[in-house]
Image: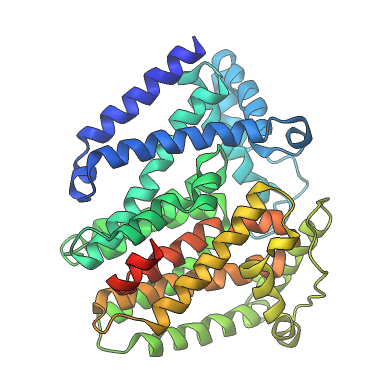
Amino acid sequence: MQYLLFFIYLIAGCYIITTNVLIKKSGLPVRYWVGFFCLKSAVGCYYGYWYSRPQQIASSDTWRFHAQAFEEYKLLLNRPASYFVNLLENPYNSWEGVLASRGYWNNLKDNLMVKIISLLNILSGGHYYVNVVIYSFITFWAFLFFYLSCRNLLNKTPGVLTTATILLTPSCLFWTSGIHRDGLVFLFLALSIWQSTKPGLRQGLIISLAIIILSITGIFLFRNYLAILLIPPLAAYFIVAQSKIRPYLVYTATAFVFISLFFLSPVISAKMNLPAALIARKMAFEKLEGTSRLPYMDLTANVKSFAVNFLKAIDHSLLRPYWWEAKNLTEKVASLEILFILLIIVTSSVFRKKLVEPDVIRFQWMIVFFCFCTLLVIGYTIPFAGAIVRYRAIFLMLMLSTLSLSVPDKIRKILI
């Protein structure tokens, strides 16, 4: 029965993709999207297998979610009232802040994942790999939304290099295909980016803003700090789009305001002490066990400490693991990705197109600003190279594909 359901949902997903209007508007042949969905499902299955191995399963979130979701699924069938209420229950003595590294709000992201998987169990009967196909179909649209964003900016189908980096960047494909939060985070993120780049935005401004707000809310529920980091570059993007001010001036001012608010947040409100919240998250990671621990970073809640550790944070998030430090296949692939991304950064800067569309320039500023801030937070807080590979995967792909938009055609042919 499990195998039958697997292929039924796989075929159903392929059929929906072939008939979808947005797929046809993308300009990329439908067969490529069908092939990508099948590839994504296969990668999701490999993700599940990889973490089902004896050396991985004890620390595997995806299989922990699966086990907990099956219990929730049984609760839904036998006591539906309890099922819908228990998400609101708080077993802690107090309601910690929404940015706290422990408590109700911190655990909500896992509890929501368990609820979502338990609902998928209605369709799959509780079979993990059947859920993989359904979940892959849901998160598949994240790639389409971001692809459509690039098409909106170029007014044509993105080239081979951009298409390949969006769909086939190994770490992004791997980590967003497994049953975990990453796929949903990317879905909400890509949806908000797509809405911000839609042509004729003024005509549908209210609807687009509503979708963006709902998407940011979705990001906040699954990875709260990303929602905070996304708002400033999105706001700056709209300011640049509606004015004649040069992007570097707007984003420089945005960075100054954002950094000032970050360090002044404890003065504004003790409950919104952002430096302390970031350090608390770092300390929570420090307590975990891992085989890829990076050199210790002594970080305190003041400007000097963050400045002193700035380059170390960039090194951790953007350059690690070095090839000689990689301990498994995923880390080795990630180290090769870094080399390719650095190559794209250099070529997009040195061999930049003579005429780059203004919309593309604005978009590049937004994505690079957002991704750089996110990588900086990851570098400050996560002390394990293996975990960094997962947390940064989406943002490396976003930067890579965005910068590829301004790589000249002659250079693109060399790179691919």
Residue 16 lies in quadrant: top left
Residue 135 vertical placement versus 170 (above, below) = above
- 293 and 411: which is toward the camera: 411
Q: Position of residue 412 (x, y in %)?
A: 34, 67
Image point 44% across, 12% down: which residue? Answer: 4
Q: Is residue 50 left or right of residue 216?
A: right
Residue 66 vertical placement versus 249 (above, below) = above
Say how the picture is coloured: rainbow
Residue 91 vertical placement versus 187 (above, below) = above
Image point 24% across, 43% down: which residue? Answer: 23
- 407 and 293: which is toward the camera: 407
- 226 and 43: which is toward the camera: 43
Q: Position of residue 60 (x, y in %)?
A: 70, 37
Q: Residue furthest top?
A: 1
Residue 98 lies in quadrant: bottom right
Image point 42% across, 49% down: which residue? Answer: 187
Image point 45% across, 67% down: which residue? Answer: 399
Residue 211 appearing in the image = no
Q: Position of residue 166 (x, y in %)?
A: 39, 55
Q: Is residue 163 left or right of residue 217?
A: left
Q: Quadrant of the C terminus?
A: bottom left
Residue 181 lies in quadrant: top right
Residue 178 appearing in the image = yes
Q: Position of residue 286 (x, y in %)?
A: 81, 59
